[in-house]
Image: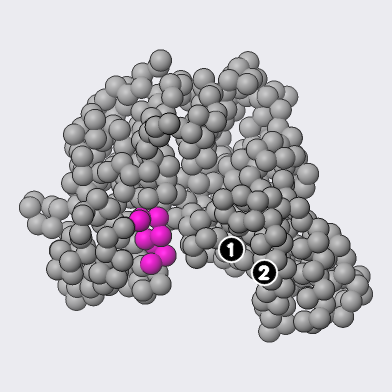
Amino acid sequence: MSINPHPELPEFDYIRPASLAEASQFLAQHAGHARPLSGGTDIFVRMRDGIWHDQYLVDVKHLDGTNDLTFTPTGLTIGAGVNMNRIIASPEVQQHYPLLAQACRRVASYQLRTRATVVGNICNASPAGDSIGACIAFGGTLKVHGLNGFRDEPLQGFCLSPGKTRLQPGDIVTAVHLPPPPPGSAGTYLKLGRNTWGDLAIVGVTVLAAPDPTAASGYRFRILLASVAPIPLEAVAAQEALAATPLGEPAFKEAARLAAQACSPIDDVRGSARYRKAMVRKHTQLALLQTWQKLTR
Amino acid sequence: MATHRISLTVNGSTELLDVPSQMTLLQMLRDKLALTGTKNGCSAGECGACTVLLDGEPVNSCLVLAVECQGASVVTVEGLAKDGVLDPIQETIVDHGGVQCGFCTPGMLISSRALLDRNPDPSEDDIREALVGNLCRCTGYNRIVDAVQDSARRQAGKA
């Protein structure tokens, strides 16, 4: 078997619609043969690898509002065309959503992040997506334009399986909206790759926590795990344990054990299932501790 | 197969080109404009040999369509030197011997130029993080990092 080290992109037609309505119409009419294009960092690789064979790529990153990054009292809205470097460099993101900036910074390399987008990361629905956990933890919703106009979709439950989402033919995610962060919140994203930087996650752990007087422990945690289940996995039992027990290293250790128990990783080229479970435990404990230090300093 | 007429600026010159939908910026630079300084390493956004500046920001040109560059300004390694005078980062990479086989060098230079444009005084960590997407299999990176640091120092001295 010979391997072509420089495969070219297969033939397709690039479509640049004039409006979101036109784009949705086109995508619905060519369902199964057309795909919305944003940064292309996943699409082109899959097309080159012969995994995707779309006849049309519909560029949606120049359409109404898709290139806007706005922060208002109601939260942060990240347009589908906003690249990750813009998010990392945004003073508002650094001040109010540092967890998101930290997660984006762990995606690939600077030049890839000039094209890569958070909305693309979400729609690609890879279990390894670095920025999805932060968006779920902040309670994100998606703004979707479909054949019947705009609607909101909660991010929770949006990813169904690797590469599969709730989107229907004609749907275009135009933005992800994050509500204001919980007062006093702190978060941590820890990623284990084969290299310190640049690789896909063997394990990714997102932790966001904030004071909450209704919790027995006084704090509410959210823990999202990447690369250890078919979808971004919320470690619910660990979260419940942390709401119920006095916080400190023993509680974090127990929560990390529960998080490792909840995940169902696979063996692949980046790591074995057994290794991943062990690393979820280690990194969850570390992420909880680091978050706790930020919360209580 | 659709072709698109695009106009863009490459290294300061205006170009009017007909490009098929699936042609990448990398193919357009190499095959249509004979700017072969930009290299094709992995075709997958991993190695950074194809890095060019698109509207001032570095991109993997293997992951950008030519048609997406309508109206854009592109700078390749051929556009770094001005009037026969090397860019400071080119000078220091020569001075420090940050080149062995040279295949990664054009992308390395572009990523380094972009780093120094957004951060004129980078730490060693900043430099290593900015060059994560540029793989070099010869030098072991140390001389390249030294060259970027020296370039920053020389620029500060001139300012």
- Please indicate whether residue A27 sits to the left or right of residue A184 in the image: left
Instruction: Between residue B138 and residue B75, name the one nearer to us.
Output: B138
Percent position (x, y) of residue B9? 25, 37
Percent position (x, y) of residue A211? 80, 73
The residue marked by circle 1 belongs to what chain? A
Which residue is under mark 2? A283
- Do marks 1 and 2 both belong to one polypeptide chain? yes
For numbered disc 2, what is the local secondary structure?
Answer: helix
For numbered disc 1, what is the local secondary structure?
Answer: strand
- In the image, what residue occupies the spot 70% across and 32% down? A167
- Please indicate whether residue B109 sits to the left or right of residue A265 in the image: left
Mark 1 to mark 2 CA distance (whole Å)? 8 Å
Task: Please indicate, yes or no, whether residue A22 appears anywhere in the rendered image.
Answer: no
Task: Please indicate, yes or no, whether residue B39 appears anywhere in the rendered image.
Answer: yes
The residue marked by circle 2 belongs to what chain? A
Q: Is residue A107 above or below residue B14?
A: below
Percent position (x, y) of residue A40? 49, 38
- In the image, what residue occupies the spot 57% across and 54% down? A270
Q: From which residue to which does the magenta span run?
A: B128-136
> Mark 1: which amino acid?
Leu
- Please indicate whether residue A297 sits to the left or right of residue A236 in the image: left
Which residue is under mark 1? A192
- In the image, what residue occupies the spot 26% across and 25% down? B17
- In the image, what residue occupies the spot 28% across and 32% down? B28
Q: Is residue A17 above or below residue A284?
A: above
Label 2 crowd bin: few (<14), some (14–19), many (20+), radius 10 Å: many
